[in-house]
Amino acid sequence: MPDQQFRLKLTLEAIWWIATALIVLAVMFPITSVFKNYPFLWANVAFIVIFITFTRYIFLLKNTFLARLSWLKVILLIGCIPLVFVLISKFYNFQTFIDEEGTQSLFSLKYLKEQVPIRNHDALGAYIKTETIFFAVGSIITTILMPFRIILSLWRTYNTEDKV
């Protein structure tokens, strides 16, 4: 029976990763359809994936395959520490670019696939700035909260029979 539950949790994890990939595609489509060389593409994708995954783990850890894998939770706990600094650095790079050059500088020909009408610059620039800030701050906050959730889970795993 426990083996069947573990397989179900792995299946659920795969479904969540597919859902996360679809969300990434939906959020990034307006950007990737216009830009051939968007300088913050991979940082933005990482922000989205980390935000969704860690939010899910914070609230639904008992329903994941990680629930009873203490060694993997310890690795995740240790990995969150440098990850916070990497995320902050990537967000700082984006914020510095926006502050110094502005979103209008993204619409130069070195970044675009084809010329975008000027009337769309403001809307797309606002979209880029808003969604990047939202997912960057969300991923940083969830990465800071994740070690506390893991410590709570480790404590519950060793001190109670059925809680995670």
Image: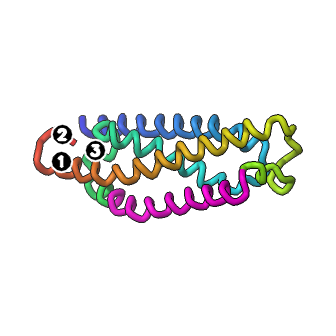
Q: Residues within 10 Å of mark 1 (few under 14, many from 20)?
A: some
Q: Earlier in the sequence, mark 3 or mark 1?
A: 3
Q: Which mark is residue 157?
A: 1
Residue occupying the point 60% across, 56% down: 95
Crowding around mark 2 (Cα neighbors within 10 Å: few <14, some 14 to 19, many 20+) is: some
Label 1 near label 2: C-beta < 8 Å? yes
Q: Secondary structure at mark 1?
A: helix
Q: Position of residue 39 (x, y in %)?
A: 70, 57
Residue matched to label 3: 67
Residue type, label 1: Thr
* The magenta segment: 75-102
| Contact check, label 3 and label 1, Cβ < 8 Å | no
Q: Earlier in the sequence, mark 2 or mark 1?
A: 1
Q: Quadrant of residue 58?
A: top left
The residue that mark 2 highlights is: 163
Please tell me which residue is depicted at 14% across the width and 51% down the height of the picture.
Answer: 158
